[in-house]
Image (cartoon, rainbow, N blue to C red):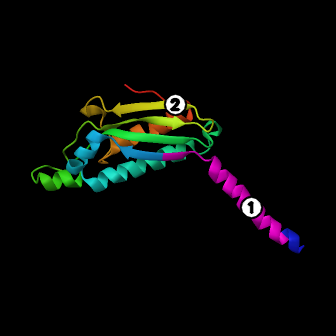
């Protein structure tokens, strides 16, 4: 009985470690132009968008057997808010943070390095077409929509999509 008490936790830990290795890893960096623009948008909010993109894509592809052990390396190249960010409101006191709306979205590029070493390019961009498409009250509404659609596309095996 003692042997079983020792082996069971070890087996559970080994299984969990094996699952963690098989999970795809997602890293997101900022493109050169967006790094320069992040001062205008607010470095903190841009970092939150990097974290949000990482979280959404990681969640979307977590159970995808085709991506087990893959590395997803994404570059956020363009980011547009639907409403002024805190930094933009601070820099331009006359701007209305509630009534000012804009065409928002995001553009993402990168690559997926599969467990077997194959490299798949990734490219996705989504922006509202016009102001009547802007729905919701969040500053990053359309960027979040772009992240969710990218995650769904990667999970479905569509790596290069966008308009």
Can you say which quadrant of the picture contains the N terminus? Answer: bottom right
> What x and y, as percent, mark residue 10?
76, 65
Q: Which mark is residue 120?
A: 2
Mark whose residue sits in front, 1 or 2: 2
> What x and y, as percent, mark residue 118?
57, 31
Q: Is residue 70 left or right of residue 146?
A: right
The mark total stands at: 2
Marks 2 and 1: in contact by CB < 8 Å? no
Q: Secondary structure at mark 2?
A: strand
> What x and y, as percent, mark residue 107?
35, 35
Residue at the (42%, 46%) spot, across then down: 28
Residue 20 within the magenta-colored segment of the rendering: yes
Which is nearer the eye, 40 or 116?
116
Q: Quadrant of residue 135?
A: top left
Query: Which residue in the structure is indicated by mark 1?
Result: 12
Q: Secondary structure at mark 1?
A: helix
Asked if residue 3 is positioned above or below residue 140 in the image, the reply reads below
Residue at the (40%, 27%) spot, across then down: 162
Q: Quadrant of residue 103?
A: top left
Residue at the (47%, 30%) spot, across then down: 121
Q: Is residue 12 left or right of residue 81?
A: right
Magenta span covers which residues? 5-26
Asked whether the viewer can see residue 94, the reply is yes
């Amino acid at each position: 009985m003692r042997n079983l008490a020792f082996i069971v936790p070890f087996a559970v830990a080994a299984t969990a470690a094996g699952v963690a290795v098989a999970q795809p890893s997602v890293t997101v960096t900022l493109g050169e132009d967006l790094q320069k623009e992040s001062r205008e948008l607010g470095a903190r909010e841009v970092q939150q968008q990097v974290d949000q993109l990482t979280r959404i894509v990681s969640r979307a592809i977590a159970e995808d057997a085709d991506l087990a052990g893959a590395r997803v390396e994404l570059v956020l190249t363009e980011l547009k808010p639907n409403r002024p960010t805190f930094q933009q409101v601070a820099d331009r006191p006359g701007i209305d943070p509630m009534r000012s709306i804009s065409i928002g979205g995001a553009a993402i590029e990168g690559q997926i390095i599969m467990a077997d070493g194959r490299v798949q390019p990734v490219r996705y961009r989504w922006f509202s077409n016009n102001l009547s498409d802007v729905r919701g009250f969040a500053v990053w509404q359309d960027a979040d929509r772009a992240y969710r659609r990218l995650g769904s596309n990667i999970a479905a095996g569509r790596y290069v999509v966008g308009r």
